[in-house]
Image (spheres, rainbow, N blue to C red):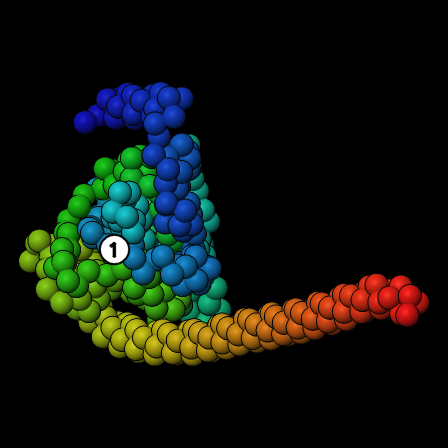
Amino acid sequence: MDLRKRTMLSKLRRFFRRLLRILGMVPVHPKINGLFTAYETLSPFYFSVEPWYLDYILKNPQTHDCIVDDVGLYKEKSGVKHEFLRFEISSPDKCHTCILIAERNGAGGNVHRDPCGDVLMFYSTRATDTNDSTDTVSSSVAPVCATGDSTTKQKPRLSSSLSSTSRWGADDLISCATLGSTAGDRLEEKCKRATRICALTFSEKARPSANELGTLLYLTSKLEPTYTVTSTQCYWYAKTVFTALETLFEDAKPNVAKHPGGTCYGVSVPTKESVSKVCGKYREARDENRRGRERELAEERRRDHEQAQAAEGRVQAAEQRERERIQAAEARAQAAEEERQKERERRLAAEERARAAEEENARLRKFNETVWRAMPSTQQL
């Protein structure tokens, strides 16, 4: 598909996404920074590997549930034929996919950008060596690494005059966006300008997570933090990570047995030793992370146990207080009942005394009446 048709297709997709956004039908992207972007975001996230891993991947437990579904090794079609890796990572709910591109650039060169802002061209500068003038790189324009199509007419070549002094700090870059978003389309355009020379597939039971992938990319960057034109350049980085994934994860298989990946102008870049070292460091980091998670889980279980004990103690104390309250209420009720019983007895005694007094009064009245009736008879005698 030519550039004009790709541009029209991209505009058409943006139009439909804008229409869906107006209608309120745009899906909500996962809130996992460092992997997923909002569907309406125009530009992908760009990070250096170290801060991306330490600040976004390592500290976010959700990255353990984001699974790598696809790994592709890409080689650009022109220029120095820059190599990079493309990953597809699914969200924890399996409803969204992240596109992630990992690549190595030479940060020590002069940086040039294309009009779209996607392509970085790194040009070498003159190396200083007062003892041997042959161990220098010409300061004239000579691309040593690129992340896009080269526009220079001069064919870049790996000069035999380059030595181990032709090195500088590497710029290992992560670009990521949500698949199907505007930002994701820009990353897809980058991949379309290159050739997918190999892919890696995993079994369902042994697929790396985004956290494990971030650990591997970080350790590879730390293993060789310098960009060397003849050895530790983009070809070395892509091939080391790709081969390490194939080595570390069970049943991981490339779809092509032999491919031109990890080659610089047809010459294979040695990666056997670096793959072995990275895999060793990865296993150490994985074991340490496992021990760390076990310690965290043990600490969490201890805290949960203490909280459960404290909660149980609070419940028991509340139950004891309730029992004491009920007992006190029952005691007060019993005392009140006893008091009422005493009051009834006092009332009955008072009533009994009143009846006795009434009876006594009645006898006295009767006696008096008898006496008064007898008095006339006595007077007559």
Q: Nearer the viewer, residue 352 or 187?
A: 352
Residue at image coords 42%, 50% = 33
- Quadrant containing the N terminus in the rendered view: top left
Q: Quadrant of residue 95?
A: top left
Q: Quick one: label 1, few (<14), some, or many (20+) residues within 10 Å?
A: many
Q: Quadrant of residue 263?
A: bottom left
User: In the rendering, at what x and y percent does residue 74 appear?
Assistant: 22, 48
Residue at image coords 19%, 51% = 70
Identity, as a three-letter code, of the amino acid under mark 1: Ile
Q: Nearer the viewer, residue 337 or 270?
A: 337
Residue 230 visible at all: no
Considering every residue shown, the one lying at the far left of the view is: 257
Query: Where is mark 1, residue-wise?
Result: 67
User: In the rendering, at what x and y percent does residue 370 appear?
Assistant: 80, 66
Q: Is residue 89 above or below residue 379?
A: above
Residue at image coords 46%, 75% = 312
Considering every residue shown, the one lying at the far right of the view is: 379
Residue at image coords 27%, 59% = 209
Horizontal placement of 169 versus 188: left or right? right
Q: Nearer the viewer, residue 42 or 274?
A: 42
Q: Nearer the viewer, residue 359 or 40?
A: 359
